[in-house]
Image: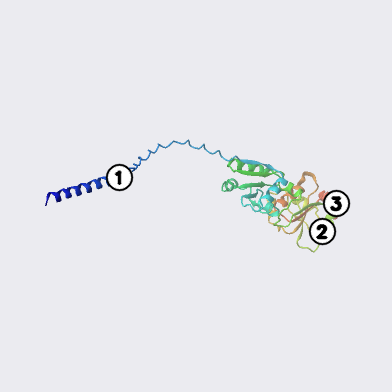
Amino acid sequence: MTKKSLKNLMMLVLSVSLVIGAVLAGGCVGKEVEPPPPETPPPINEPEPPPQEPTPQIIGDITPQEAFTLIQDDHDNPDLVIIDVRTPEEFAEEHIEDAINLDYYSETFQDELDTLDRDTTYLIYCRSGVRSADALDIMAGLDFREAYNMTGGIIQWVEEELPTIQETPPQIIEDITPQEAFALIQDNQDNPDFIIIDVRTPEEFAEEHIEDAINIDYRSENFRDELSQLDKDKTYLIYYTCACGGIDSKTLDVMAELNFSEVYKISGGLNKWKADGFPTVE
């Protein structure tokens, strides 16, 4: 190789080196170096939310009109429950529509209340407001959220002509005069479903009594049991010696409690019957 060729080769290598160096230098020009990511600050301990206060109880009395409005406003609301705390016999005779029956006198009454949903709204009532007021106190002690006692009970509800449901025919429990009693006996002479009951002692009954009467002694230890064995769908006329002592009225009350359908009491008893000129037999 001649000196000239060698010189040219060296010049070429130098030129290529300069070009490569320029390219490499140009690639670094203007290249931004990304800064390292900022450090994540430590978490801030947020204060815990204050504990929620329990929902306050709403336990109180309302009138029948207010109870009726409550029922109308929540007619399709399954969270409104109406509880009748009277006996099953009272409930069957007449009650507010859609009510359920939990007998206040039952030994399991409080246990039955204890199984109910505490977050439901309850309307409770009884005959006059006494039993339901006690039931309201029990529900308050069991932490029910919302419960109302209807003051005056179903008696006041009916007096205000608000609607009820009757599962059995209404009872007919009445005082009648001797004249009305005599007419009733005449009209039912051949009626086997009409029974006259003399509630005096057997000795008094043997001395004299109204014809066809049977004797069930009020003072007998078995008096209530004997009454309970009678057909409650028949018609009864009862009497005592007089109105003194209220034995005839007490008998009427017992028969009403036993759910007899139709019972009449001679006002003034056998003494008034005889004084008005009506007959007896010995």
Q: Which mark is residue 26?
A: 1
Quarter holding residue 260 = bottom right
Q: Position of residue 144 (x, y in %)?
A: 59, 43
> Which one is in front in this view, the residue at disc 1 or the one at disc 3?
1
Mark 1 Cα-neighbour bin, 10 Å: few <14, some 14–19, many ≥20: few
Looking at this view, name the residue that lies furthest to the right: 277
Sequence-first tag of 2 and 3? 2
Check the image and report above or below for 181 versus 122.
Answer: below
Residue 265 or residue 279, whichever sits in front: 265
> Please, which residue is most extreme toward the bottom here?
190
The residue labelled by disc 2 is: 185
CA–CA distance in space, label 2 to label 1: 134 Å
Q: Quadrant of the C terminus?
A: bottom right
**Viewer-proximal residue among 222 and 138:** 138
Three-letter residue code for mark 3? Lys
Taking the view exactly as shown, the residue that stands out farthest to the front is: 4
Q: Secondary structure at mark 2?
A: helix
Label 2 environment density (alpha carbons within 10 Å; few <14, some 14–19, many ≥20): some
Residue 69: x percent and y percent?
70, 48
Question: Which residue does the image show at 24% across and 45% down from the upper left?
Answer: 18
Contact between labelled residues 3 and 2, with CB atoms less than 8 Å apart: no
In the rendered structure, which amino acid carries the disc numbered 1?
Gly
Front residue of 191/151: it is 151
Which of the numbered marks, if any, corresponds to residue 274?
3
Question: Front-most of 209 and 105?
Answer: 105
**124 to the left or right of 266:** left
Secondary structure type for disc 3:
helix
Q: Residue 38 at x, y = what percent?
A: 38, 38
Q: State which tag comes first along the sequence, 1 or 3.
A: 1
